[in-house]
């Protein structure tokens, strides 16, 4: 099984979501280290493939939905 990915910064940054991956921590490091501006997160989307874990895809969707909710509030 492959990971799902959170894609940000117009496809320039991929955050893997899957077993043994800390996607939330990775997103935090990306923003905290000024790798991308936080405003780029509102354009995040999820990339899943046929062999991606369904759970990984669901977790990635939940993270992206939470980010979008935070920016729309």
Image: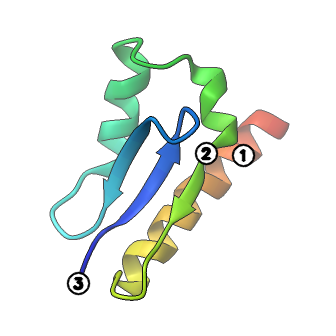
The residue lying toward the viewer, choosing from 11 and 53, is 11
**Element under label 3?**
loop
Please name the residue that numbered disc 2 is placed on. 44
Callout 3: few (<14), some (14-19), or many (20+) C-alpha neighbours within 10 Å? Answer: few
Q: Is residue 39 left or right of residue 73?
A: left
Residue at the outermost top position:
34
Residue 35 seen: yes
Residue 40 rendering spot, x and y as whole percentages: 62, 28
Alpha-carbon distance for marks 2 and 3? 23 Å
Query: How far apart are the two marked residues, 3 and 1, measured between alpha carbons?
Result: 27 Å
Residue for badge 1 = 68
- Give the residue furthest to the left: 20
- The structure residue drawn at horizontal position 37% and vertical position 26%, both measured from the top left corner, is 30
Label 2 close to label 1 by CB (< 8 Å): yes
The residue identified by callout 3 is 1
N-terminal of the two: label 2 or label 3? Answer: 3
**Distance between mark 2 and mark 1 Cα atoms:** 8 Å
- Left or right of 16? Residue 54 is right
């Amino acid at each position: 099984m492959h990971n799902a990915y959170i894609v940000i910064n117009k496809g320039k940054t991929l955050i893997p979501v899957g077993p043994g991956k800390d996607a939330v921590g990775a997103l935090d490091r990306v923003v905290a280290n000024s790798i991308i501006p936080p405003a780029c997160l509102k354009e995040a989307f999820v990339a899943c493939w046929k062999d991606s874990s369904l759970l990984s895809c669901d977790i990635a969707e939940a993270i992206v939905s939470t980010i979008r909710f935070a920016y729309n509030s």
